[in-house]
Amino acid sequence: MTSPSELDAPCDLDAQIVLDARYLNGSESGIGRYTEQLVRCALEMAPSIRFHLITHPAHPRPIDHERVTSASFRAPADSPQTRLLLPHLRDLGRGDLFHSPFNYLPGELDIPTVFTLHDIMWLIEPDYCTHRLWEKWISGTYYQWVIPRSVNETDRILTVSHHSREEIEDYFPQTEGRVHTTYNGVDPFFRPVSPEEGWPLIQAFLPPRSKFVLVVGQESPYKNHPGALEGFIEAFRDEPHVYFVLVGRLDKPPSDDLRVLMDDPDVSSRIVEPGYVSREQLRALYSLARVFLFPSLYEGFGLPSLEAMACGTPVVTSDRGAPEEIGGEAAVCVEPTSPEAIGAALKRLMGDDAWYDECREACLERASQFTWRRCAAQTLDVYREMLAEPSR
């Protein structure tokens, strides 16, 4: 990782970066947070850099700064129009370099290009992406078409973990040497809050001062929510004072497997689905949970586990891929398909206060290593390297 002294040194990059910022559309998303934090930190660290943002019409100026200009493009970021029509936008010619912060590029551009390929799950594990056959067919076909073309056309690729970098280079051998890891950061907003501050925010859906296991993530197969609930049931079927809190998007109903588990009469009254929660409520949930459970089958990074760590909550996560890499020795890593392994980790953290305290301190230390300034510094290094090469 970049050293602290390097993060404090100003960057001398003098360039205009055209960046697709349409995920800054007013809704919460990981790519949106990544985009905003990257731009804000780069502006702070590089006094001569300028950004020209391609924005969503609903939020035409998501970042108000003297070195930021914007132009709206009326199409969703993850639509074919990005590939086919965005290249004809006149404003793309205003930059020295184009950066797409999501998983593919517009068609061939006349300036150097880089894009952030968060993962290649649609290419290697499409069954993990969705329960719905029509979505797998439509979205899967599109991503299997657009990602390889973007890979072949781009000058550089950014990704968010070494695990993702290795997968990209294995799948696309021609990219070796052109893929750079730029870890995500954790927003300073996510910090431990006291019970006195946190419980008033979440008491509408949890009994005061109750013990609970927290799961956060959209209802997609790779998140392994059925496995999380199976592990919870393994640990706490006969402990009626422990709750299971599932915070997820409202746009996807639970899978059949998850619904069957949620209907289990021994635990159904202890399963809490609060629906939409504010950032303040999410921080309170992270902080007051006894354990954050994140047994994903696949991740490019896994930002929720890092946010939970930053709030001082021990994390039980997968012993594979990016979750293990990001959690490091601070997380409790288990086989995500084993309810027994998940249950044993949950039960020990619930009952062993000394070990809990050790895990809590380790998680706070681990989370402090991931900052958006570090992500921006690594990205600026790639920009500089690209712009120093001979022009096309």
Image (tube, rainbow, N blue to C red):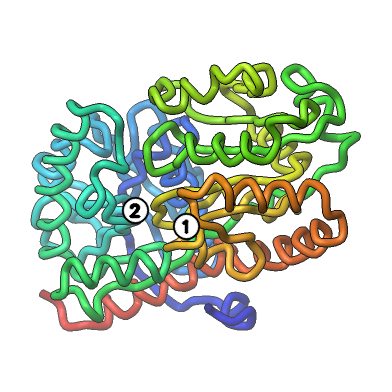
Considering only vertical position in the picture, is 384 above or below 141?
A: below
Q: CA distance from mark 2 to mark 1?
A: 9 Å
Residue 270, quarter of the rendered image: top right
Q: Could you tell me residue 108's position as x and y percent?
A: 9, 56
Q: Residues within 10 Å of mark 2 (few under 14, many from 20)?
A: many
Q: Residue 220, percent across and down?
A: 38, 35
Is residue 246 positioned above or below 363 on the image?
A: above
Q: Amino acid at mark 1?
A: Leu
Q: Quadrant of the C terminus?
A: bottom left
Residue at 35% in and 56% down: 118
| Quadrant position of residue 76 | top left
- Foreground of the two, 61 or 231: 231
**Taking the image as drawn, is residue 47 in sight?**
no
Q: Secondary structure at mark 1?
A: helix
What residue is pinned by disc 2?
101
Q: Secondary structure at mark 2?
A: loop
Query: For the residue carrying disc 1, how many other residues have a C-alpha within 10 Å: few (<14), some (14-19), or many (20+)?
Result: many
Amino acid type, mark 2: Pro
Q: Residue at x 11, y 40 (%)?
A: 141
Position in image of residue 357 (x %, y %): 83, 59
Residue bearing the label numbered 1 = 38
Q: Is 292 on the left or on the right of 202, as rendered?
A: left
Q: Is residue 271 left or right of residue 120?
A: right
Q: Are marks 2 and 1 in contact (CB under 8 Å)?
A: yes
Q: Residue at x 25, y 59 (%)?
A: 98
